[in-house]
Every structure is written in structure tokens, then in C-alpha cells.
Image: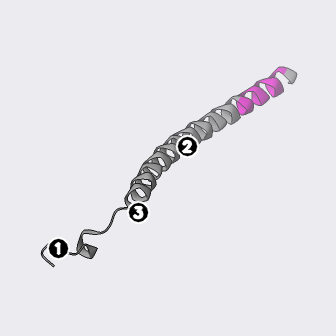
Amino acid sequence: MRLEALEFKCAYLERAIQELSDVLYQQSQRLDEAVLRNQQLKQQLELIESRVGEPAAEAEIPPHY
């Protein structure tokens, strides 16, 4: 009976470890996606910031005026 209880606990722990491993993998994937998206947004922000000082094309007065 005692061996059977240990086998049951071992099986339970193996299943719990596998479930935690699966969750960890999913979280790792989501983190990778978030880091990539963050990098993309940072690049977009840097591009916008670099253009802030540039006059808009429609705001410029044509040279013949």
C-alpha cells in the first residue's frame, strides 16, 4: 500500500511538473512576442520623434510666392 501511495504521488508530481513546464513555455513565447512588439514600437517612436522638427510638406510655402 505504501509503495502504491508513493507511485500515486510521483505520477501526480510528474503531471504537475509537465503542466508547469507547458505554462512556462507559453509565457516564454508571449514574452518573446511582447519584446519584439516593444522593439517595433520603440523604432516607430524614434522615427516619429526624428520627424517632429521637420516641417510638413503642406505647411511649406512654395518658392514662387
Quadrant in the picture for residue 54: bottom left
The percent coordinates of residue 24 (x first, y second) are: 61, 37
Q: Earlier in the sequence, mark 1 or mark 2?
A: 2
Q: Residue at image x 51%, y 40%?
A: 32
Question: Is residue 4 rendered magenta in the image?
Answer: yes
Which of the numbered marks, if any, corresponds to residue 62? 1
Question: Is residue 53 rendered magenta in the image?
Answer: no
Q: Which residues, given as a range, are shown in magenta?
A: 3-13
Kind of residue indicated by mark 3: Val
The percent coordinates of residue 15 (x first, y second) are: 67, 33
Say if 50 sits above or below 12 in the image: below
Q: Secondary structure at mark 3?
A: loop
Say if 15 sits above or below 46 in the image: above
Q: Earlier in the sequence, mark 3 or mark 2?
A: 2
- Please name the residue that numbered disc 2 is placed on: 31
In front: 7, or 37? Answer: 37
User: What is the distance, in whole Å, between disc 1 and disc 2 at their CAs?
Assistant: 49 Å
Which of the numbered marks, if any, corresponds to residue 52? 3
Mark 3 neighbour class, 10 Å CA radius: few under 14, some 14 to 19, many 20 or more: few
